């Protein structure tokens, strides 16, 4: 019977692999998306998944300062999505005039 620590390590490692694979698929959607909205949503999802990845790595490594990095990255990710959405809105309004 495996110990709890072994199961925890296996689960965290599996979640890192799963998050990395889904980040890759979201990156493909961001590159190939037919519309700008698809690309913005994919960028937002990538940012969220990277925050989760850093949090899981924080648990694996056991370093608490990585939680602070998660918070900083969350703010930067939010601001980047707002700027991207604003630029798309301005581009769309400029083309209608």
Image (cartoon, rainbow, N blue to C red):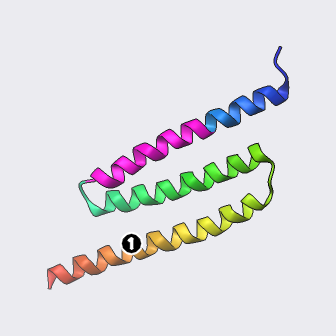
- Determine whether the residue tagged by mark 1 lies in a helix, strand or loop: helix
Residue extending farthest to the bottom is: 97
Q: Which residue is labeled 1 in the image?
A: 84
Vertical comparison of 1 with 42: above or below? above
Question: Which residue lies at the image location 53% right of the left edge and 67% below the top edge?
Answer: 77
* Residue bounds of the magenta highlight: 16-33
For the C terminus, the quadrant is: bottom left
- Tell me: 25 left or right of 18: left
Vertical comparison of 96 with 19: above or below? below
Question: Which residue lies at the image location 35% right of the left edge and 54% below the top edge?
Answer: 30
Q: Where is residue 93 in the image (x, y as percent from the top left)?
A: 23, 81
- Majority secondary structure of the magenta segment? helix
The quarter of the picture where residue 36 lies is bottom left
- Which of 92 and 32 lies nearest the eye of the viewer? 32
Q: Where is residue 66 in the image (x, y as percent from the top left)?
A: 73, 58
Question: Which residue lies at the image location 16% right of the left edge and 79% below the top edge?
Answer: 95
Q: How many marks?
A: 1
The quarter of the picture where residue 84 lies is bottom left
Q: Residue 76 colored magenta?
A: no
Q: Position of residue 78 (x, y in %)?
A: 53, 69
- Tell me: 53 left or right of 77: right
- Tell me: 38 left or right of 8: left
Q: Residue 31 colored magenta?
A: yes
Residue extending farthest to the top is: 1
- Tell me: 33 left or right of 4: left
Q: Position of residue 21 (x, y in %)?
A: 49, 39
For the N terminus, the quadrant is: top right
Dot 1, how many residues are within 10 Å of its Cα: few (below 14), some (14-19), or many (20+)? some
Question: Which residue lies at the image location 65% right of the left edge and 53% below the top edge?
Answer: 54
């Amino acid at each position: 019977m495996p110990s709890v620590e072994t199961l925890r390590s296996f689960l965290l490692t599996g979640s890192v692999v799963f998050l990395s694979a889904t980040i890759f698929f979201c990156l493909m959607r961001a590159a190939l998306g037919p519309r700008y909205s698809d690309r913005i949503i994919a960028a937002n999802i990538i940012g969220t998944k990277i925050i989760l990845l850093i949090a899981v790595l924080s648990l694996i490594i056991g370093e608490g300062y990585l939680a602070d990095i998660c918070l900083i990255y969350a703010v930067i990710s939010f601001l980047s999505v707002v700027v991207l959405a604003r630029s798309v809105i301005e581009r769309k309004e400029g083309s209608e005039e």
